Amino acid sequence: MPELPEVETVCRGIRPHLQGRVFTGVTVRQPQLRWPVPDDLAQRLAGQRVLAVSRRAKYVLISLAEGCLMVHLGMSGRLFFVAAGTAVGKHDHVDFALDNGQLLRYTDPRRFGAVLWLEGEAEAHPLLGHLGPEPLSADFNVAYLLARAKGRSVPVKSLLMDGRVVVGVGNIYANEALYMAGIRPDRAAGKISRQRYARLVDCVKQVLTSAIAQGGTTLKDFVGGDGRPGYFKQELLVYGRAGLPCPACGSALREIRQAQRSTVFCARCQR
Ligand code: ZN
């Protein structure tokens, strides 16, 4: 499943080829994604120039003069460029034609993704309005996190994965950051010191920044060739390594379930 670093990589991959281009048409082969693709999308987009390509949480935002095309990759969605006339595969649900003869293609085998149209300011949209700050922004800092944790008895891992608190810290990155910070994932959020939260904020930023840097190596996959960018394999310290030795102390990593998700941690290093 694409996580924040992958969505950021998608944005960086498509931005230089999309910014300044004009949409000339849209072909929707399968409108039934997580939410239906709007019927009038072609009319909305035709003739409009792309002003900017950005990301908010795990949404790709393609801004035009009169609104914004919003794409969510769901579990298995991909966005990439192909030349007009390129053969269409079973899961190639939407093509956005551009004035340079290229198509921006949306493909999604599991169809949990979304292609939506937003009028007006993107930040005001119900899907975006309630979201917490971006984890790599200055707004995500120790004072902020401490205030959000105050008096809360929820496990710190749940706090970190709550999009109203901070966006884009998925299960993998929550596991990794808590391990790096030496904090037990099931510790009550309200019972962690300022100093330890300062460390956790740093670790969240570090783990996401290094994942984005790794994604940079896949940027060339967004254009040309066989054109289907994959999601990158990352080197992880604890996630997916239950039962294996802790990289720091060598004791076996433990696994518990929290909110139906796998949590892996070192009972010796994380307190
Ligand atoms: Zn350990």
Image (tube, helix red, strand yellow):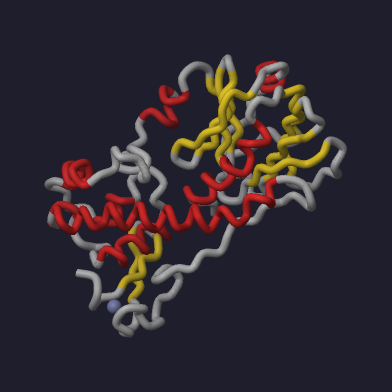
Query: Which is more toward the observer, 232 or 224?
Result: 224
Q: Is residue 3 above or below residue 98?
A: below
Residue 67 point in image, percent of width and height: 55, 19
> In the visual, does 93 lie left or right of 101?
left
Quadrant location, the C terminus: bottom left
Q: Is residue 175 above or below residue 74?
A: below
Q: Give the quadrant of residue 184.
A: bottom left
Q: Residue shown at 59%/20% (left/top)?
A: 64
Q: Residue shown at 32%/71% (left/top)?
A: 265
> Across the whole image, how many numbered discs are drawn on residues?
0
Residue 208 point in image, percent of width and height: 42, 54
Q: Is residue 250 above or below residue 156?
A: below
Q: Residue shown at 47%/24% (left/top)?
A: 122
Query: Which is more toward the observer, 121 or 163?
Result: 121
Residue 179 point in image, percent of width and height: 31, 67
Q: Residue shown at 27%/52% (left/top)?
A: 201
Residue 31 point in image, percent of width and height: 68, 33
Quadrant location, the N terminus: bottom right
Q: Give the quadrant of residue 45.
A: top right
> In the visual, does 98 lie left or right of 258?
right
Quadrant holding ligand 1?
A: bottom left
